[in-house]
Amino acid sequence: MLQRMSLASARLLHRHALVAAALVVACDQPPRSPARQPEGILAFSAKVASPSPAGGDWLVAGDWDRDGYPDLATGTSTGVLSVLRNNGRALFAPVGTYALRGSPVALAAGDLDGDGDADLALAQPGQDAVALFAGRGDGSFSGPDQVAAGLAPSCLVAADFDGDRRAELAVGATASSEIILLSVGRGAQRYPVAAPVALASADLNGDGRLDLVVGGEPRAGVVIEVLLGARDGSFSRGARYELAASRLASLAAADLNGDRWPDLVVATGPVGIELLFGKGDGTFRRGGRVQTSERLSGLRQVVLADLNGGGRADLAVVLAPDGATAQLSVLVNRGGGGFAPAVVVGELNTVGVGRTCLAAADLDGDGRLDLVSSEGQQVAAFLNQSR
């Protein structure tokens, strides 16, 4: 039986959290024709590399020192959390490392204790727990404080699911096939799902409550399940979709076709990007596949963000055409759920790298979302120069 949280753990699950990595959550307003904005010319700088001595298999952005610029945190499969400070020009310097028991497999950031400082959460499947680090507001963290979270937790999302301005932490436990919802004063709530490996949150039915989208890998195929949020922070079972794929690489939600309802991008393997268009009632219709160049294989991760100023969520992907390099590419949203052919932003070295992670954030304070990726023992930033 899942242990109840300690007082120290409860303080870390308080209010206002940011969704992990670079997940962009769509608007929850009723459908209407959106105002078209002028579409800019997509352009990015050459790679801006910064050292990350501990390496990084997982990456998340957040303002750890409250200077207004997104900093980075990386987690490694060797059990090290590394914190990198942004100098305001997308150059990062290591400011702290923290040892973990076991190997983390997911990393999320947000203000989990309500003190105005960003905190960190890492999933540790070998420990059947989540490790919580409390931010001090100066770029340093205290912890970790471990909280039991099912069997083999592998994915995280933090958000205010009950509308009380306090964040809850949803944890996908793969081996016990459940979602563990950790919240202050309630211990843990459990919801059975199929071997979860990816999570996203958005208001799928316009009721003002965040819902959960769960991507699972049962014994055969990929399953997408919806958990509909209620006013009291509980969830009820919603729609379920089975995809003809062998694995799930990434899951993201945003309005792709301009109807103001969240849609889903599901990166499946060995190669494939599936689209599911939201109907506004918590269900989806199949939208087909996003086409990419045949030589781009080995899909790693997807991120949704407006990268060219067109007012629509574009698709940023990291793909690996061979074993030595990966290509960071952007597919511009043409509207109506269609995407332009992939434009290569830059190449990433993946030799000896277990996983390449990607995030979107305004790294240099110019009002445009940039892209940053883990790359072995360094992080690689690509500054948005679209106009």
Image (tube, rainbow, N blue to C red):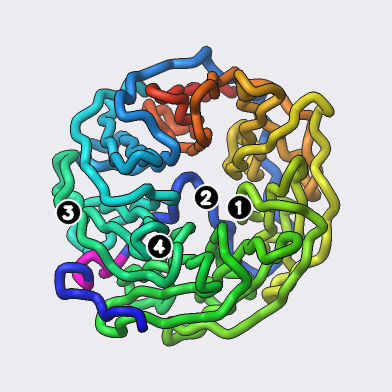
Q: CA distance from mark 3 to mark 4?
A: 18 Å
Which portion, as a residue range, is magenta? 10-15
Marks 1 and 4, how far apart in space? Answer: 14 Å
Question: What mark, if any, has residue 92 been given in the picture?
Answer: none
Dot placed on the residue nearer the N-terminal end, 3 or 4: 3
Which residue position holds label 4? 158
- Tag in front: 3 or 4: 3
Identify the element where label 2 is drawn: loop
Where does label 1 land, which residue? 252
- For label 2, the residue is 23
Q: Residue at x 63, y 62 (%)?
A: 215
Amino acid, disc 4: Ala
Of discs 1 and 3, which sits in the foreground?
Answer: 3
Q: Are marks 2 and 1 in contact (CB under 8 Å)?
A: yes
Looking at marks 2 and 1 on the same chain, the residue that comes earlier in the sequence is marked by: 2
How far is mark 2 from mark 4, CA to CA? Answer: 11 Å
Q: Secondary structure at mark 1?
A: strand
Closer-to-camera residue (192/23): 192
Of labels 1 and 4, earlier in sequence is 4
21 vs 143, nearest the viewer? 143
The image quarter in which residue 32 lies: bottom right
The answer to which of marks 2 and 3 sits earlier in the sequence is 2
Q: Is residue 319 left or right of residue 113?
A: right
Q: CA distance from mark 1 to mark 3?
A: 29 Å
- Does residue 206 show up magenta in the picture? no
